Image (cartoon, rainbow, N blue to C red):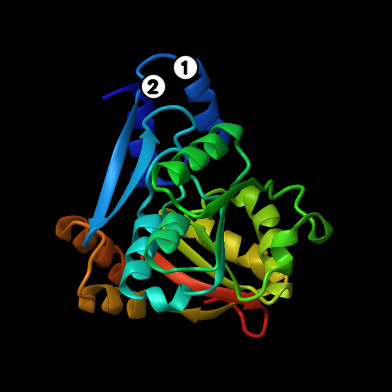
Amino acid sequence: MSVHRALLVAGEMSGDVSDAVCRAIAELLRGDDDEASHVSFEVDEIHLSLRVFDRANAVGLRLWPASEFFAAWVVADPARWRNKTLVELGAGLGLCGLAVASFAAPRRVCLTDSDPVVVRNLAYNAQLNGAKADVADLDWTSFADEDSELLKQSDLSLVAADCVYDPDACPALAAVLRRFARADARIWLVNAIRDRDTWASCLDTFTRHGLALLDDVTLTASTAIDAAPRTLLAPSLWERHKGAALRGDLRLVEVGLRSAPFQ
């Protein structure tokens, strides 16, 4: 196992790996074993493929459990997204948004990230799947209402998958979520809980920004995925994610303007 991969695995098992650490390691190892591969999902006659990288900026160029969970929920309940506009925040590979584009007949999908390498790979993945999805650079630290036509969309939803992993990034994330909440967007936050202190710290930050948990749909989504006639994930992978959801190690919540504290 490479040093970089070993550090990522260790971080996933024991806590958080910051963007800065991943970028520094990727820079040191640039050009060494940085080959791309493709991961594919198939449901009925629909194929969804993603280009992934093991090394360079691994935070944004690898698959994460939360995006797989959310994508499986999309396949199980596509009507929820029909004729809606979905923005994926910190999209990484774009699995959440591309699942909506491929299976749910939305009005529009926009995949966003701030890392130039990730944004280029997002565009590649959208083109690879022939998806009607826009790709845009969205930096949490500089996002403002007046800069974004996304906030003017009707029937707007936003998903952020595995975006809660670094307390230092949470104030900027919370500010973006609040702006979308004030634009009447439905906001879905799906996250693996690798470090409960980090999760709690970020939720406190959200509360200070006027946000709250409106609904926890983790178990409802798990039940829907189990009962669905079509499935996105291999049975063994789904059982692993379902187990994490039942233990509280993977959560899917709806976030909005504060009317009650986070739980």
The number of numbered discs placed on residues in the rendered structure image is 2
Q: Residue 34 carries which label?
A: 2
Q: Is mark 1 on a helix, strand or loop?
A: loop
Identify whether 55 is placed above or below 235: above
Q: Where is residue 223 in the image (x, y as percent from the top left)?
A: 27, 79
Q: In this view, does 176 lie to the left or right of 101?
A: right
33 horizontally vs 1: left or right: right
- Residue at 32% over, 64% down: 72
Q: Is mark 2 on a helix, strand or loop?
A: loop
**In this rendering, does residue 99 appear at all?**
yes
Q: Name the residue under label 1.
A: 30
> Is disc 2 surrounded by few (<14), some (14 to 19) or many (20+) residues within 10 Å?
few
Amino acid type shown at disc 1: Arg
Q: Quadrant of residue 210?
A: bottom right
Front position in the image: 187 or 127 = 127
Give the CA distance from mark 2 to mark 1: 7 Å
Which amino acid, by three-letter code, is at mark 2? Answer: Asp
Residue at screen point 48% across, 24% down = 26
Dot 2 and dot 1 residues touching (CB under 8 Å): yes
